[in-house]
Image: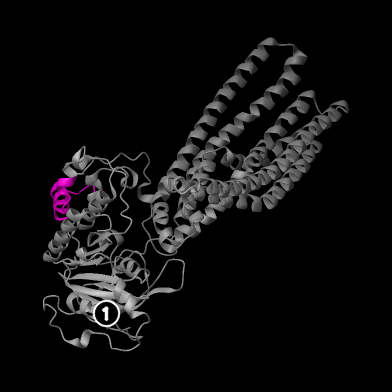
Amino acid sequence: MSVRQDRPREAFSVGPERSLDNTPDHDPVGDGLRQAARRMVGIGVFSGVINIMMLSGSVYMMQVYDRVIPSRNLATLFGLTLMVLLAYLIQGYFDALRARMLCRVATIFDAGLQHSIHNALATLPLRGAKPMLMQQPLRDLDQLRGFMSSMGPTAFLDMPWIPIFLIGLFLFHPLIGLTALAGMIAIVAVTLAIERLSRGSVKTATETMAMRQVIADATQRNAEVLRALGMMDRFSQRWQQVNERYLRENLRATDLTSNLGSGAKVLRFVLQSGMLGMGAYLVVSEQASGGVMMASSILMGRALAPVEVALSSWKQLVAARQGIARLRDICRATAKPPAPPIALPRPYRELSVQELSVVAPGTNRPIVSNISFALKAGTGLALLGASASGKTSLSKALVGIWPAQHGVVRLDGAALDQWPNQELGRHIGYLPQDVALFDGTVAENIARFDQDATSDSILKAARIAGVHDLILRLPEGYSTRIGQGGMSLSAGQRQRVGLARAIFGDPFLVVLDEPNANLDADGENALSQAIAMMRKNQSIVVVISHRPSALAALNMAMVLYDGKAIAFGTTQEVFARVAGQKLQAPPAQQAVAGPNPNNNGNNNNSNRPPNNNRPPRRAALAEKV
């Protein structure tokens, strides 16, 4: 069975404009905005046609007052009416075309950033980002795309035509032009006031909305626990507090923009009425015609239209600007490192860890300190220790999830960061405590959603993991959809499918964190056989487990205590030392080389840590191990 599928046809392609530069100075958001700006030039041409057609109403009004009414010529009226109707149809067509083009420019901008945004969503949790920030890039991108496809950008496309309308008003009469210019300056001043006053409130409203979304996501993920433990009302109170704060900040921002926007609208009405009054004065004083009076009022309304559109969408504009700044910072901080110029071969000799220290993302306190060891191909290592001793943190560093604060992890002498993530993933198998399956079929999950995976490779991984027969008993076999998180499978089934996923592709390094936590006797036997098979295939297997059944197929062991390696060697000698309560703490600087896994424990004692710095409560530790 192959998981090869027809790739969906992309609706939009960014083509050669999409940059693959991953240097730290690369700004994908800025690149996308510049490409969108170039596309906006073409839309600006349509805006020019629309604004020219907008003059037809003023011209029609002036001709009716100055020519048709005095001459009482109905043929002229009929001809002018047909002409203005045609102008309105052309204006409507280009207006709809402009709106469609804006929507497509926004969609292409979104599509061009998807790679960077998804990389940020996958990287932020590994950097210790706050929960409210983890989904912020996607929200900012949605906000920015929504603004770009709305009528907001049309205001800026129409604003270059405002001086042309003002020149036309000056041509009607200098007093009309001066009145329009004074009103325009007043409206611009109100606009700047809106920008200054609304910036903080919009930012606060965005942050509280993110906090509300975090609580909503946590409630959905943990609905069963909340119901079973009677925590619904308590989380409801937390939700209400955050939601009330969001509503309060949003109301404050809306009130501010509404008040100032209403003030600007009143100013516009005053200006238009003042324009009529000025025109009437000029007509009475015989300095202008009635047609000029009406045309100037219409032309003034058209000159103010872009400002009115900008004011009505100012809140969205401020949010989009703040989103651009956040997107730029996040995309730069989470940019992938540049691809190595040389493609490294598949590792096959050894795993070496040199003076490794690991901290949790977002913290500075080392969880694992100064660990050094080496494992040859075909070695199986049992990683032992009491809870919170650093086992899981070390395992995450071994597979490259958490970067090393100090030291390095090497495969065949090459540090992990010398491989691109996708290439490194082919050489590593990993089964975390939380198996983390994905919505899809069993075959897709085992194949790591590789569309080029073959049926033979999937079946091979399933058979080594001992889960082939179990999968065949599912309703649709390998084609069974397991739902988000593997919700349609039991905990044991999820763990065994996750083991097959870790084995898929014959990885060189396989790290299993509590792989038998949910397994029955048959599952544990299958796990032991899988470990033996992987070692026979010259893979290095590292297993974290508190149950001895998973350790029987391993030949090496390491004991961690408080983030330090206090014992390392063959399983026989390490277990003997644990049983005899002879565990010793390592010195500050440790460099332990792994013995040959084929010497059956007959290594010399030079690889043992010196017997000093005895840790406290060693008897209790030995009992836990």
- Does dot 1 land on a helix, a strand or a loop? strand
Image height of 263 relative to 62, above or below: below
Q: Quadrant of residue 433?
A: bottom left
Q: Quadrant of the C terminus?
A: bottom left
Was residue 460 drawn as part of the magenta stretch in this picture? yes
The residue closer to the viewer here, 89 or 471, is: 471
Q: Residue beneath label 1, please?
A: 567
Per the rendered image, the range of residues in magenta is 449-470
Q: Position of residue 75 (x, y in %)?
A: 66, 11
The residue closer to the viewer here, 412 or 241, is: 241
Task: Report how many numbered discs are placed on residues in the image.
Answer: 1
Q: Which residue sits at x=21%, y=88%?
A: 606
Can see residue 413?
no
Q: In this figure, which colouring scheme has been used for the structure?
A: one colour
Q: Position of residue 192 (x, y in %)?
A: 70, 49
Left or right of residue 164, residue 181 in this image:
right
Q: Quadrant of the N terminus?
A: top left
Q: Position of residue 22 (x, y in %)?
A: 38, 61
Q: Position of residue 498 (x, y in %)?
A: 25, 53
Q: Quadrant of residue 483?
A: top left
Left or right of residue 357, residue 179 in this image:
right
Q: Amino acid at mark 1?
A: Ala
Q: Which residue sits at x=16%, y=59%?
A: 530
Q: Which residue is the extreme one toward the right?
A: 285
Q: Quadrant of residue 424?
A: bottom left
The residue closer to the viewer here, 496 or 106, is: 496
